[in-house]
Each structure stands twice: as C-alpha cells, then as structure tokens.
Image: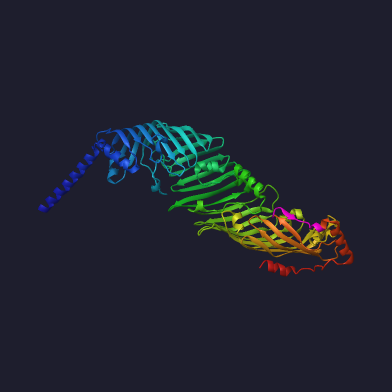
Amino acid sequence: MYRSRKLRVALVTVAALIIAAFILLAAFPWGVLKSRIEARATQQLGRPVTIGSMARADAFSLHPTVRLAQVRVPQPAWVGPRLPDLARIAEIELRFSALSLLRGGFSLEALDMKGARLQLYRDAKGRENWSDNEKKADDAGGSSALRLLTVADSRIAYRDDKQRRAIDAALMVDRSGLRLSGTGDVRGHAVRVQATGAPIDDRGQGARWPFAVSIAGDAVGLDLRGTMAGPLDIGHLEGQARAHATDLALLDAIIEAGLPGTQPVRLTAKVTRDRPDWRVENLKGTIGRSDIAGHATIAKRDGRTRIDGAVRANRFDFDDLSSNEGKRKAAARRARVGDRIVPATAIDLKKLARTDGRLTLSVRRLLWPGSSPFRTLSATLQLEKSRLELRPLTLGLTSGRLEGSLIVDQRQGGPRLTVDMALRSARLLDFFPETQIDGSLIGRIRLTGVGGTVRQAIGKADGAIELVARDGTIPTRTAALLGQDIGGGLTAREESRAVLRCMVARFDVAGGVARPAPVIIDTSRAQTHAQGRITLADERLALSVSGAPKGKALLRLEGSLPINGTIKAPDIRVPERVKSAKGIFGMIKNAITGHQGPRAADADCDALARRALR
C-alpha cells in the first residue's frame, strides 16, 4: 500500500514536471537568446552576424512567432569589400516548432520577410559566399516544413565569376504567389530573368507546387515549367525544359553540365530531379545541321557522378561539335601545320576523374563537308574511374564497315590511347576515288600511344597498320607509271584499265614511325615496292618507290622515285635525269637495245596477304 502510494506520487510529480516544462517552453521569452544566437551564427559563418532587435510576437504557444529587425550578415573575409553585405534584412517574422528543438533540429513553419537585400557570389575558384563548401554533400537537403512564406520589398543579386553570369531581380511572395523578375548577363549576353510559383501557404499543403523559370535572351535562353514536391523544394521536381543558344558552351554556363562548344543549339526535354539524381527523358533537338534525341540518368554517389543513357541521330556532322571560335582556331592550326588525317581531338580525362557511366550512340547518317566513305556510326561508351572504352565501335562505310574498339586509359599516368579497328568488306575506290583504283579492301589498325590528344598519342604509338586490296582494276596509265614505264604511261588511253591483282601494305609502327613491311602493288602491267618511313607525329613522308614492268617498256625509268611531303599532300619528285634530254635519250637507247633491267613476275598475293595480316 505504501509502495503504491509512493509510485502514484512519483508519477504525478513526473507528469507535473513534464507539464511545467511544456508550459515554460510555450511561454519562453525567445528574445533573451538574441546575443547567444548572434554568437552562434558568428561562430558558424566565421563573420560577425548582428541582429538589431529580437522579441517574441505572441504570448503562449508551442509554435511561437519571433520578430527580428535589422539583421546583417556580412560577406566572408575572402570576398572583401568589393561587394555589399551578403544579407541585410529590415524585418523578419518567423514561426517555428519549439518541440523540434528538443529533438535537436529546427523546423521552420512560417516566414515573413520585408526589406531584404541579398548579394550572392561565387568566385572563379567555385567558392560560394552563402555556403560552407567543405560541408557539401550529394544528398544534402530534403523536404521542408515551411507552410507559409511572404516576402515584400526585397531584391536578390547574384554574381558568378566561375561561369561569368549575373542577375539582379526583385522578389515578392504573397497570397497571389511567388514572383521574381529582373535582368542578367550570361558571358556578356543580356538576358531577362523571371520566375513564378504558387502561393506558399496552407492552401497548397500536401499538393505539388507548380513553378516556372525563364532565362530569356537572343544568344541563350532556358525555360523550365513544372512542379516541385513542396514549395521551393528544388531537390524534388519535374518539368518540361526548352533551351536555345548560339553555342552549347554558352548554355552550359547556366546548367553546368560540362558541355563543349558547338554550333547553335535548340533542345527540349522532360527533366526530373530526385536529389541527388537527375533524369532526362524525351530529349530532342538540333546542333547546327545535326539532330539528336535520347535520354540519360545522372546519379551522384560518394562524390562521384554516373551518367547512363542513349543518344541517337538521324543526321550528324562532327563539325557541329566545334564552335565558330573552335573552327577559327582549327583553321589557323591547319594554315600553320597543314592538313592532317589524324585529328587533334583531346582525350585527356582529368575533368572526368569523378565521372562514370555508360552511353550508347547511334547515327543513321554521318554528314561531312566533302566526300567521305563513312556513312553510319554506332558505339557503346563505358567510362569507369578514368578509363574510357568505346566497344563495340562500328563505322558503316559506303561499302563494308570499320569496327573494333578505342580505349583511353588514364588510371596510371597517360592518357594512353589504344586503337584496334578491323576493316571489312570495303572497296578501295570509296577511300581514294580520285585515283580510279578499285578492289576489295580489308585491313586492321592496332596502335597504342600516350598523349593528350589523338594526334599526340598516334605520334608516339607502337603497333601495326595493315591493308590488303584484291581483285580490282587500275587505270592502265597509272599501272604503267607504277612500273616506271614512262612511255607506256604517257601513251596509254585514259579509259583503258589494267588488273589490280593485289595491293598489300603493312606498316610496322614503333615510337610513332611507320615503316613498310612490306608495301607492294601488283598489277597485270607492273609491280611496285615502297621503302622508307612515315613519321606519324607530323605525317611526313620519307619514302621511295621502285617499280618494274611485266612486259617490254617503251621508256623505262631506272632506279627509285622519292616521295616526300605529307600523307595529305605527298610530293613525288621526278629525278632531274628524266627532265633532261640526255636522260630521255638514255631511256630510248635502253628500249632499243633491250637493256631495261629485269621484268617483274606475278606476286604471290595470297602469301603476301597472310604476311601483312599476321
């Protein structure tokens, strides 16, 4: 009995204490914490935060309303005096859940702000004056408990030196909704900035919050309309986006996806964000004269970004992936170093060190400024921890296909480029139509080298280049000249054809130098061999060819013929003795006397092909 009475007393006492604690919490004079809040904010932000006055606006509630006046948050020290304070707010009235403080959090339920001036800034290094960059997390944020927001007589200014963009806009939020309107600048191009949203009050609680954002300009623009999971919940939204720009890199100054410079672009897509992930669906648009479509998912985990998706095009021109400035620089480079076959495309993966993913590419028709045998493209790109692999990679040709893999590995130094491509069922005429030489063509390229661009890597590569053409035709004039039958070449009819029995070209490559091993052209009229080297770094030729006819030559050139210049612009030097009367009479004499040297026999094309393709 005694113990029972003591237990009841204890329970009543505890209940009384709990009730008293709730009463004290509901009646707590929050204004007395002004100095402590200033000190805590100053400590957390590393700058002197001041509050002119702070007092409770109601008398008794577990959801108290507190009024603050003349709140000032200066810029961090690294910004200096060049910009106004980060925040100056004439008056703030806020309502929060006192019980949330007992759980170690702070649940803001209502906010009324007047006379705010916010100056947001990001410097060229990416430091942001409104956040602690060291504490950013991929999954930061979440749904808000905010049930009521009103803002009057307020402005937001934003300057970003990293992306070279800025805005200055007026902000109002009332029972009619959210409205932001102002002007801005994106890399020197003027834009008009507008945003609207539904009212932020109890009427919309539990429903998705509609919004619209527009950045409109002649050079660049972005329009996004949709809904958020809750008011201002930018971590959970979906909507329809439209964008245009004179250059995709200019649009990237807004969306920051690491996009390259291109020709003018127009895009539409459905976008969904479920922080920290983005999903892009039904992507459609044009870049220059190319069209693209596809989808992608961008996920962030443990400090890494993963992009998975697919891109397809009915028509695609690789030149559209260069801006006008990029084309100008490329033209200047060509004028300085001459035309090159191997592109100077960058393959350095440093900027993608924290990016992984898988993309499938499909192009139904490749567009080129001139003639080209390349017609279609399909590839799967796999990027994992600084290793990019294109496998399978298939280029459809006018006849046949070029297929294999391309790998860029930067896990240990590099980047190291490995190319392994096989040529199947092709035609020689498709690659060199001006020569009028045709035949079935197969081959393989296997090269590995280190460099920041494709050209640099190939210029240091080791490996082999193998080509075999069989059972074709060749102009009789060309066949005679390849056999150094000058007279036969000059007298042959233009339309006449000889048989191309085989053309076998194998180049062993070491340190960026390709050497014939062997290079032979065998026709019904003659046989030709090539010696020397090709320096792949600058594509310079240092070759010599020697040919022999298979029959009697009208005028036969003895010795070899040097070939210099570049792969794109070969320089075939005719020996001085051929140009002189003495040299011509010597060839005539040899023809009359029969002293023209040995004639060539048919080559064993099967054995040569096996040797070249070993």
Q: Work out which quarter of the rendered image holds the C terminus and state it.
A: bottom right
Q: How is the image coloured?
A: rainbow
Residue 67, x across and y down, in percent? 30, 33
Please say whether residue 571 is one of the residues in the magenta stretch.
Answer: yes
Residue pictured at 74% horizontal, 59% vertical: 562
Residue 488, x across and y down, in percent? 85, 59
Q: Nearer the viewer, residue 303 or 45?
A: 45
Residue 197 visible to an observer of this rendering: no
Residue farthest right in this picture: 592
Q: Nearer the viewer, residue 506 or 102?
A: 506
Residue 328, x across and y down, in percent? 62, 43
Residue 379, x across and y down, in percent? 59, 55
Give the quadrant of residue 189. Answer: top right
Residue 18 visible to an observer of this rendering: yes
Q: Is residue 204 left or right of residue 54?
A: right
Magenta span of residues: 566-577
Give the quadrant of residue 564. Answer: bottom right
Residue pictured at 75% horizontal, 53% vertical: 434
Q: Does residue 456 sit above or below 104 in this rendering?
A: below
Q: Does residue 435 sit above or below 47 in this rendering?
A: below
Q: Does residue 582 sit above or below 117 in this rendering?
A: below
Please say whether residue 496 is one of the residues in the magenta stretch.
Answer: no
Residue farthest left in this picture: 2
Residue farthest top in this picture: 153
Q: Nearer the viewer, residue 328 or 59?
A: 328
Q: Is residue 152 left or right of residue 27?
A: right
Residue pictured at 54% horizontal, 49% vertical: 295
